[in-house]
Amino acid sequence: MAENVKKDQKPGIEDDNTELGNISVSKDVVAIIVAMEVTKIKGVVGLTAGRKGMSAPLLDKDNLTKGIEVSMNQKDVAITVSLVADYAAGIYQTARETQKNVKKAIETMAGLTVSKVDINVLDVKFKENLEKPEKNEAKKEIKSAQETETEEKKL
């Protein structure tokens, strides 16, 4: 029964033959689990798909899996995560925690054996750089409200 391997199986889908039936987990599902786990880790600013110029742009919620590579074979899964780290949190500690949490999540949730979790830290952000966008957005909202008030007074 263990020798009964499907030759027409789609690549990227892990298959587990049990006496109750087959269980398969696709690469996409593994990538989603990884993305959700990585974004919870303190020190991870976000996921990225690579560098553009001097910095690595963060991926939005809908595209998080673009920063994750999943390689699967019959026995195990290898994962590569590209991320942006918070400099103040410590890059090495953040990467190690990411490796441990991703491995545990995949093995627990998907029942797969994780052979390795590679972490690519493609950029770091400093605390002051993380706060600036929030402050800038607040300033823009205030300025927009003030401009609206001024225009209303003119009318």
Image (cartoon, helix red, strand yellow):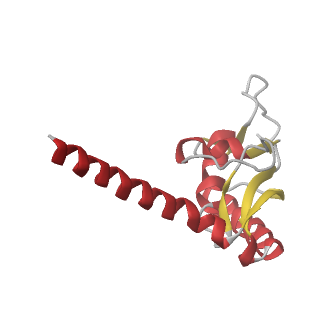
Q: Residue furthest left?
A: 155
Residue shown at the point (72%, 27%) measured from the top left: 10
Count of numbered labels shown in the rendering: 0
- 26 left or right of 138? right
Q: Position of residue 86 (x, y in %)?
A: 71, 69
Q: Is residue 30 above or below residue 8?
A: below
Q: Position of residue 114 (x, y in %)?
A: 79, 57
Residue shown at the point (80%, 51%) measured from the top left: 80
Q: Quadrant of residue 142?
A: bottom left
Closest to the observer, 143 or 116: 143
Closest to the observer, 47 or 28: 47
Residue shown at the point (65%, 72%) measured from the top left: 127
Residue shown at the point (61%, 65%) measured from the top left: 130
- 5 left or right of 153? right
Q: Quadrant of residue 117?
A: bottom right
Which quadrant of the figure contains the N terminus?
Answer: top right
Q: Is residue 152 above or below residue 36?
A: above
Q: Can the viewer see residue 110?
A: no
Closest to the observer, 41 or 59: 59
